[in-house]
Amino acid sequence: MARSRLIALSIAVALLGVAAGALWFFSWLNTPDRAAMTLGRGISFGNVLEAPREGDWGLRLDEELFNRAKEAGFDSIRLPVRWSNHAATTPPYRIDDAFFKRVDFAIDQAVRRDLNIIVDMHHYRQLDGEPLDPNEQRVDDGVLEERFVAMWKQIAERYEAADARRVFFELYNEPHKRLTAEAWNRLLRDALAAVRPSNPLRPVIIGPAPYDKADFLHDLDLPFFDRHLIVTIHLYEPYEFTHQGASWVEGSSAWMNTSCCSDSQRHEIEQRLDAVKRWSRWHFRPIWVGEFGSYDKADYAARQRYTRFVREAIEAHGFPWAYWDLASHFGIYDPANHAWRTELKDALVH
Ligand code: BGC
C-alpha cells in the first residue's frame, strides 16, 4: 500500500512538473505579446525624417506633431528615419551626431507624453537596389550590408538606456528587390546580433520581404530563441484603391476613380487578416499592422469608409496598428492649415 502510494505521489509530482514546464514554455513563447499589445493605435510621422534631408519633403519634426498625435488619442508614434543618408560612407560608418540629436528629440517628445515610439530604418534605397533620390549619397555596393549592421549597432548603443516599454526598434521598412527573402533573412540576423548585446530585451520589429507583405510571412525566418520580436505587415489592399494616382507607382493613374469598399474588397481584406492570424498563432509571433492608409487622390468619402473598415477589421483580429500617416499625402492632418481631416481621424481614433 505504502509503495503504491509512493508511486502515485511520484507520478503526481512528475505530472505537476511537466505541467509547470509546459506553462513556463508557453509563457516564454508568448513573451512579446504584451509588448506588442501596448502599441495599440499608432500613427507614422511620414515624410519627415525619412526624406533625404529633413525638410526636403515639406515637413519638419516639431512639437506640434507630437501634440497632435497625443491630443488625437494615439498610443504610439512610428518614426521612419533615413539613417543611411546621415552616416559616413566608410568604416565605421559614423552616424552624424546632429542628426542623432533629432531622433533624441523625437524620443524625448514621445516619452514625456507617455507615447510609445518606434524608431524605424527607412529608405536605404541603395540597399534595396533602387535608384537614389536627389540629395542622397552613394556608397560602395560592397559595403551596403555591413554599413546597415554598423548603423544598427550605433543606434542600439545610443538608445541602450531608453525605456524598453516605450521605445521600439524596427529593423527595416519594406525590404525588397535587391533584398530578396534569402538576403533579408541573413541580414536581419546580422543586424539583430548587433542590437542584442546592448539591448537584450528591447522589442524589435521585423517584417517579411518583399514590402512587409502578409503573403510572404511564410518566407520570414526569425531566430527562434529571440522572444522579443514583433512581426510587422503592411496592409494596402485594395491596392488599386489605396494607391490610385500615386506618382511612385507605375500604372496607377489607370486606377483613378476606384472606390471602396465592395463586398469582394472587404472579403479580400478579411481573408488576408485571417491568414495572418493563423500564421501568428502557428509561429507564436505577435503581429503589428505597421502601415495601412490611402493616398489623397482617392475620393474622400471612400477613404473614410476604407479607413474605418480596415481599422475595425484589424482590431477585430486583435492586432495593434499604425496608420500611414499623420501629415503627408495619406495624412489625417493638414499641416499647412493646422487642421485635422476630422472624418479620417475619427475613423481611426475617437
Ligand atoms: C513609404 C512611403 C509610401 C507609403 C505608401 C511607405 O512605406 O515609405 O513612401 O508613401 O509606404 O506606399
Image (cartoon, grey):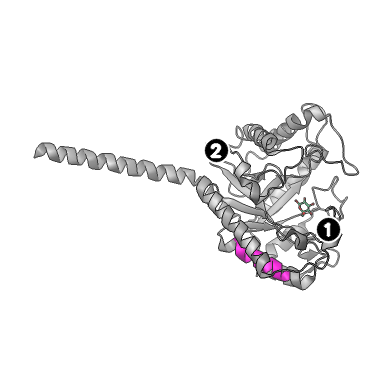
Q: Position of residue 69 (x, y in %)?
A: 71, 61
Element at label 2: loop
* Quarter of the image that includes the C terminus: bottom right
What's the amino acid at mark 1?
Ser
Location of residue 328 (image quadrant):
bottom right
In the displayed structure image, the side of residue 150 where residue 287 appears, left or right = left
Q: Position of residue 349 (x, y in %)?
A: 66, 67
Q: Tag on residue 252?
A: 1
What's the residue at 35%, 43% (across, down)?
20
Q: Earlier in the sequence, mark 1 or mark 2?
A: 2
On the question of residue 349 being in view, the answer is: no
Does the magenta-highlighted stretch encompass residue 264? no
In the displayed structure image, the side of residue 195 where residue 282 appears, left or right = left
The residue labelled by disc 2 is 226
Q: Position of residue 154 (x, y in %)?
A: 71, 34
Which residue is more in the foreground, 147 or 109?
147
What's the residue at 79%, 48% (across, down)?
49
- The relative height of residue 36 versus residue 94 in the rendered view (above or below) is below
Main secondary-structure element of the magenta-colored stretch: helix
Magenta stretch: give its range: 304-314
